[in-house]
Image (tube, helix red, strand yellow):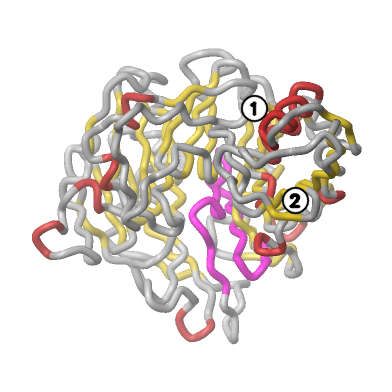
Amino acid sequence: MAQVVFTKNLQRHVPSPPVSAPGHTVREVLEYVFNQNPRLRGYVVNERGSLRKHMSIFVDGELITDRTTLSDAVQSESEIYVMQALSGG
Amino acid sequence: MNDNTLHIGTRKGFFVVKGTGGDARIVDEHFVGDNVVLSSTDPRDGAWYVVLDHGHFGMKLHRSDDQGASWLEIGVPEYPPKPEGFVDISMWGNEREWALVNIWSLEPALDQTGALWCGTVPGGLFRSEDRGVSWRLVESLWEVESRTRWGGAGSDQPAVHTINVDPRNPKWISVAISAGGVWRSKDCGATWTAHTTGMVAGYVPPEQADWPEHQDAHCVVQSPSSPEVFWCQHHMGIWRSDNDLESWTEIHSEPTSFGFPVAVHPHDKDTAWFVPAHSDQKRAPIDGRVVVARTRNGGKSFDVLSNGLPQKHAYDLVLRHALDVTADGDSLAMGSTTGNLYVTANQGDEWHCIASNLPPIYSVRYA
């Protein structure tokens, strides 16, 4: 199971503690998390499922490359960080 | 309703003001640190709505059913998937994503209990019938032929920023779009007609100057007491329609006709207020003097009101949602991008600066 950590800036809007989640892609992992925590979805992706413009996701230290469908691969022990980019600040 | 309760939406919070004229005071604050771009009050159930722009985390709507004691996050408008093969190129030459960028208007839909209208970027009108929990796109407006040619104005994508519900019939609504003209539906949003005859755009080639889709109506207010009269602060100046949107006539204000908001007296179609700025090119008061322009005769002449307003080195700009008038027409309030909140209890003859250290003010609404 991948470990998913959400930026602390999210916490005052929607509590989103670190969580373990299954999945082979970022999309699959996040879908699992969103199903557990539905309000979180709209804070991370838009209604098209695309990563919000000023959000960033790292998988094992690397920025994901597919921000539209979140197809980047995830390993069973991956660490995923969902962060806010400084560009939006 | 309490005419002397004001809701102030700012770059860093939502503030509640109570009192009249110089006695008005900030009495409460909510969402401090968050960008509150708009607020609305539903006169039917007293609910307060605020629109938050969280930037990184997108647009959110919150409702309070207990005058701010608690807030509930509700739904936001979501665009439907774009049909396969549909081409929707924005003015920037890019394929337009059908996804919510911003919310620029929110009004009670008075034809049905619990219903709301919401205007969005890019160029959408949405309707909720469950007090904002869920929303659906008004596809009839989204599908008008010219929609893909609407331009961005004040935003990269077109914004539906004005929604007027007609006092004669709650199923008649008019909307204004920057920049996509003025539209009206007389069947609760099923069909739409553009109403821009007489308006002129100076930012397109001359042969396109009167095209409806180019009209950047910054703000349109329908007279509550004489609903056949509409006032418009347009990008190019001020227009008024006194024939129920059949046509518009240009009005010349003092000291300029450039600005963003307009307020109309609830009981007098010929009295309206504007907040002039120097020009499109210089969006600041002339010579550092903040003034309000008031007409009492339908735009034939204007009083330039300055009593109580800063007259030296002031650079306040009042945005389209940041001027409002009470139901009796006596009190007005306006907030500026400089964070100043001004109120008057005598139709603008005398102004009071209630707060001068607020964040940039986007929205001022009497609750």
Q: What predominant SS class does the magenta segment belong to?
A: loop
Q: Pinpoint residue B236: horizontal percent, then vertical percent.
A: 29, 63
Q: Mark 2 highlights which residue? A: A58
Callout 1: SS: loop
Q: Residue B22, located in which quarter of the rendered image?
A: bottom right
Callout 1: chain:
B
Type of amino acid under label 1: Gly
For residue B203, say whether it is visible: yes
Q: Residue at x 80, y 50 (%)?
A: A60
Q: Residue at x 77, y 46 (%)?
A: A82
Give the x, y percent position of residue B325. 55, 47
Q: Is residue B90 left or right of residue B267?
A: left
Is residue B140 a member of the stretch shown in magenta?
A: no
Q: Is residue B319 magenta?
A: yes
Amino acid identity at mark 2 = Phe
Query: Pointer 2 indicates a residue of which chain?
Result: A
Q: Which residue is mark 1?
A: B75
User: For this rendering, which residue is in front, B176 or B300?
Assistant: B176
Single out the residue that lies furthest toward the top: B113
On the rendered image, what quadrant is the N terminus of chain A found in? top right
Residue B52, position in %: x, y?
67, 44
Within-10-Å neighbours for mark 1: few <14, some 14–19, many 20+: many
Question: Which residues are the magenta region?
Answer: B316-341
How far is the residue under mark 2 from the one under mark 1? 28 Å
